[in-house]
Amino acid sequence: MAAFRIVLLAAACAAIGLSGAARAAEISGAGATFPYPIYAKWAEAYKVKTGTSMNYQSIGSGGGIKQITAKTVDFGASDMPLKPEDLDKNGLVQWPQVMGGVVLVVNLKGIGPGQLKLDGKTVAGMYLGTIKKWNDAAIAELNPGMTLPDKAVATVHRSDGSGTNFIFTHYLSSIDPEFKDKVGENTSVEFPGGLGGKGNEGVAALTSRTDGAIGYVEYAYALQNKMAYTQLRNPSGAFLSPNSKTFQSAAANADWSKAPGFYLLLTNQPGADSWPITGASFILMRKQQTDPAKAKEVLDFFDWAYRSGSQMAEQLDYVPTPAKVVGLVEQSWKQITGPDGKPVWTGSGS
């Protein structure tokens, strides 16, 4: 599917009566599809408030990393955090902007949202091709009393380099040694079979129109497409349905203060109520900026999103970044400097 684009016209400034002091601007970004629904909502609200346009290409985390490295956008977005050494090598900084959950979705006649129970070992078997039918004993054991169809399992995966791929394959690799050995974890991996879709939207579309399919998408896509998501067993042994409460529980256990370069993964966090495939979506920017004013516009947008966008995030079942983490993030922005070596952003309203 064609990449989503947010093009919010700065000409709207005059229509909403902004003061002459308001400066029309356009900032550009590209990357993860995971946070696209909330970035779109934030961008629309920010345009109304400030007149600043935001053009975001939802092309996958791999594309976002490539574009910010190539200096073709003002910021990149990735659901796979870069390791500190990779940030340093490429002159980048990163921070978590929002958190959410990756969920399993199925297309099985008569099975609705939250009715089917799965665990990581069984999901790994399905994606490895060792569990071939929906009435396999491994699935039946997790769903006593449920009539499961004698139907082939059709796995759907991401075909593009994506952070959702990374979160999902990291989760399965941490549970199943065979999956780790044969597929591994990365933004782009070789699955032994199945159908590939581009972006969360592509996986959602393929799963929705393929009888017997199972796929993995960010939760907002499952809700928007009215898909049947599954319950999933977490490390505490509890079967959970995905929702903001279970995502928040996983995010609450994260200690960002001890994560160099904010490199931290949220899969399989402890806690009876923690959703096991929770992840953060990260923003990437260059440390050295040639256009300090443009860089400040970008940071103003994300500062506003932290401070005024939490309710919008929760409405889409994302987890806003905790206030104490926001403080750490905005302190880290001092690394982003202009040609004169001075920080481009010195605080809200600067």
Image (cartoon, grey):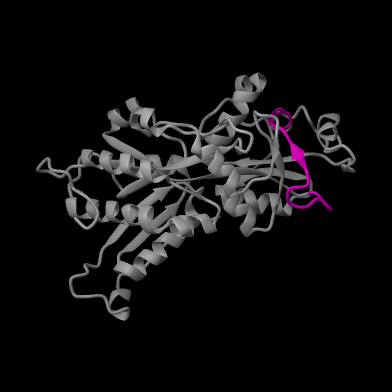
Q: Is residue 68 above or below residue 90?
A: below
Q: Is residue 292 above or below residue 144?
A: below
Which of the pair 96/247 is nearer the observer? 247
77 sits left or right of 11 in the view? right
Tell me where residue 79 appears, x and y as whole percent. Answer: 47, 40
Tell me where residue 123 appears, x and y as whole percent. Answer: 71, 33
Residue depicted at 15% across the width and 45% down the height: 338
Q: Is residue 244 above or below residue 51?
A: above
Tell me where residue 346 appears, x and y as whole percent. Answer: 19, 48
250 sits left or right of 85 in the view? right
334 sits left or right of 133 in the view? left
Residue depicted at 28% across the width and 55% down the height: 300
Residue depicted at 83% across the width and 36% down the height: 133
Q: Residue furthest left?
A: 340
Residue 120 makes an appearance in the image: yes
Where, quadrant-wise, is the N terminus in this rendering? bottom right
The span picked out in magenta is 108-125
Tell me where residue 293 appears, x and y as whole percent. Answer: 18, 55
Which of the pair 341/346 is nearer the observer? 346
